[in-house]
């Protein structure tokens, strides 16, 4: 009887397991059908990492504490001194989170996880360099460059002082190591914004080697090294500079993928017009392609005027209307003269087709693994604005109309760059339609567009100021005037 009961129990368990597996498989299938786009699950690098911020910080604090304690010695004085240092460090980071310039980074799970990974791997690399070679081989500049390009320059400066203090503590409290890391770190930060391609890292490596050699020579002249030590330290310093370049080239693309970061180098690569999306836009929707190019010129100049990321503004504008590839003939810039496929449609249906280009653009961006920063520009460049022409047409028809059916789904712009692309997009389209694009009319049109967006609350969710909007207005007016202003018609000499 017991044997039958056991057999029955195992049969039931097997049946339940089979049902659970089938249900899970169906659920995966449904998600795959419903999802707008899926990443390749076989590629680990395409997996988004979403670790809670508190957990990342807590684990990092614990890891740093024990790494320092194990290196300095496991006695009561070491426990207490390292605890004080880690508390001061944590308080300093907490104070930085209140700075408005870095608030977006400190609220981003991926960015905080990356910050923690850079700290832990940096300290671990320092310990390995010290244990199996020389602390002068430590490629600190690599971690600082990656912090500046993947996070921000302010965080890179913080990392410079953090690693210099930790290195000074771990390497017998040597002053030369402290200054060596500060100099090799700070020498590369001013040129970070000018890095446009991966070959520029070779120039960065030369700067690092030069700074390392100068710092080592300075301490040799102060009688800190013997001649033999000086020669060995020079070799180590040169090797450390070369190693920094190698670490950057290997780990920068890895961190870009793992933590969803977009660098200027990646943006330059995305701006290549041999990219399949941009090439299809040029061939299948030439009017939209030209509009995107003009919008990119306007957005880039405006972003540069207020100190925003001009490369991101330009590349975001290239891709902001890729959703029009699905139905290009329904957008006026692609329509032949006298042909309008909206004529037989109701205003609500026409509005639905126009609104769908945002969702279609997001779908194409995800399908082609376009970076999140560009995807945000696609999603936010219309905000929650109303398609007024079809809304007014529906009102004139006399039927009951819901304004929500004529609104873009949003979200509203979250960044200054997204707000600039919104303004540039509308300004380019409106000024292109002017019959007599004089300087005064262009200025009035741009000002009206910005005022309408502002009063509709489209800029409520982004950190843009009134001063920024005035600067953007002047920049957009100047750029559009240069593109579309009326020209004098010269008479042909007879």
Image: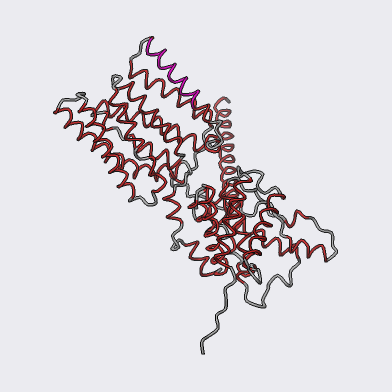
Q: Return the x and y of residue 232 as percentages of the image width and height.
A: 17, 31
- Say whether residue 338 is left or right of residue 373: right
Q: Return the x and y of residue 487 as percentages of the image width and height.
A: 57, 73
Look at the image and tell me whether residue 383 can be seen: yes
Residue toward you, 226 or 199? 226
- Say whether residue 212 is left or right of residue 149: left
Residue at 67%, 62% (x, y): give it: 353
Question: Looking at the rendering, which quadrant does residue 333 occupy?
Answer: bottom right
Residue at 57%, 75% (x, y): give it: 488
Magenta-span inclusion, residue 90: yes
Magenta stretch bounds: 77-92
Q: Is residue 474 above or below residue 247?
A: below
Q: Residue furthest bottom?
A: 494
Residue at 56%, 25% (x, y): give it: 2
Q: Return the x and y of residue 407 as percentages of the image width and height.
A: 71, 55
Q: Is residue 47 above or below residue 7?
A: below
Coloration of the structure image: secondary structure
Q: Residue furthest front?
A: 493
Residue toward you, 471 or 10? 471
Residue toward you, 414 or 217? 217
In terms of secondary structure, what is the magenta stretch mainly? helix
Q: Is residue 199 above or below residue 434?
A: above
Q: Return the x and y of residue 175 as percentages of the image width and height.
A: 29, 23
Query: What is the quadrant of the N terminus in the image?
Result: top right
Question: Looking at the rendering, which quadrant does residue 332 occupy?
Answer: bottom right
Question: Looking at the rendering, which quadrant does residue 275 occupy?
Answer: bottom left
Tag count in the figure? Answer: 0
Q: Residue furthest left?
A: 228
Q: Is residue 172 above or below residue 46?
A: above
């Amino acid at each position: 009887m017991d044997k039958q009961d056991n057999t029955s129990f195992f049969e039931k368990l097997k049946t339940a397991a089979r049902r659970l597996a089938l249900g899970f498989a169906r659920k995966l299938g449904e998600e795959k059908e419903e999802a707008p786009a899926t990443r390749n699950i076989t590629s680990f690098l395409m997996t988004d990492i979403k670790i809670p911020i508190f957990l990342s910080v807590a684990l990092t604090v614990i890891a740093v504490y024990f790494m320092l304690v194990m290196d300095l010695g496991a006695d009561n004085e070491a426990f207490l001194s390292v605890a004080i240092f880690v508390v001061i460090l944590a308080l300093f980071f907490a104070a930085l989170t209140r700075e408005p310039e870095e608030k977006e980074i400190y609220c981003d799970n991926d960015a905080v996880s990356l910050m923690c990974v850079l700290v832990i791997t940096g300290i671990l690399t320092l310990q390995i360099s010290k244990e199996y070679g020389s602390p002068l081989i430590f490629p600190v500049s690599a971690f600082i460059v990656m912090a500046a390009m993947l996070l921000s320059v302010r965080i890179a400066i913080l990392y410079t002082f953090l690693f210099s203090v930790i290195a000074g503590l771990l390497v017998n409290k040597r002053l030369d190591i402290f200054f060596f890391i500060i100099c090799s770190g700070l020498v590369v930060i001013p040129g970070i914004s000018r890095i446009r391609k991966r070959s520029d890292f070779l120039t960065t490596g030369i700067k690092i080697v030069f700074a390392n050699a100068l710092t080592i020579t300075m301490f040799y002249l102060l009688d800190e090294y013997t001649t033999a030590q000086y020669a060995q330290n020079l070799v180590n310093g040169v090797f450390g500079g070369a190693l920094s370049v190698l670490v950057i080239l290997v780990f920068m693309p890895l961190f870009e993928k793992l933590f969803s970061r977009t660098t200027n180098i990646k943006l330059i690569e995305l701006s290549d017009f041999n990219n399949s999306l941009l090439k299809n836009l040029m061939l299948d929707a030439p009017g939209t392609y030209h509009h995107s190019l003009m919008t990119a010129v306007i957005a880039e100049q405006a972003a540069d005027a207020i100190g925003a990321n001009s490369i991101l503004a330009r590349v975001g504008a290239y891709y902001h209307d890729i959703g029009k590839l699905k139905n290009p003939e329904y957008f006026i810039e692609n329509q032949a003269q006298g042909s309008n496929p909206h004529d037989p449609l109701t205003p609500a249906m026409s509005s639905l087709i126009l609104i769908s280009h945002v969702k279609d653009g997001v779908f194409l961006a995800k399908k082609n693994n376009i970076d999140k920063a560009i995807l945000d520009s696609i999603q936010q460049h219309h905000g929650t604005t109303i398609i007024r022409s079809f809304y007014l047409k529906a009102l004139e028809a006399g039927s009951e109309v819901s304004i929500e059916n004529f609104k873009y789904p949003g979200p509203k712009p979250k960044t200054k760059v997204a707000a600039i692309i919104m303004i540039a997009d509308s300004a380019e389209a409106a000024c292109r339609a002017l019959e007599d694009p004089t300087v005064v009319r262009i200025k009035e049109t741009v000002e009206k567009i910005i005022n309408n967006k502002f009063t509709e609350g489209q800029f409520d969710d982004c950190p843009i100021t009134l001063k920024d909007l005035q600067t953007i207005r002047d920049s957009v007016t100047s750029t559009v005037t240069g593109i579309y202003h009326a020209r004098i018609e010269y008479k042909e000499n007879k």
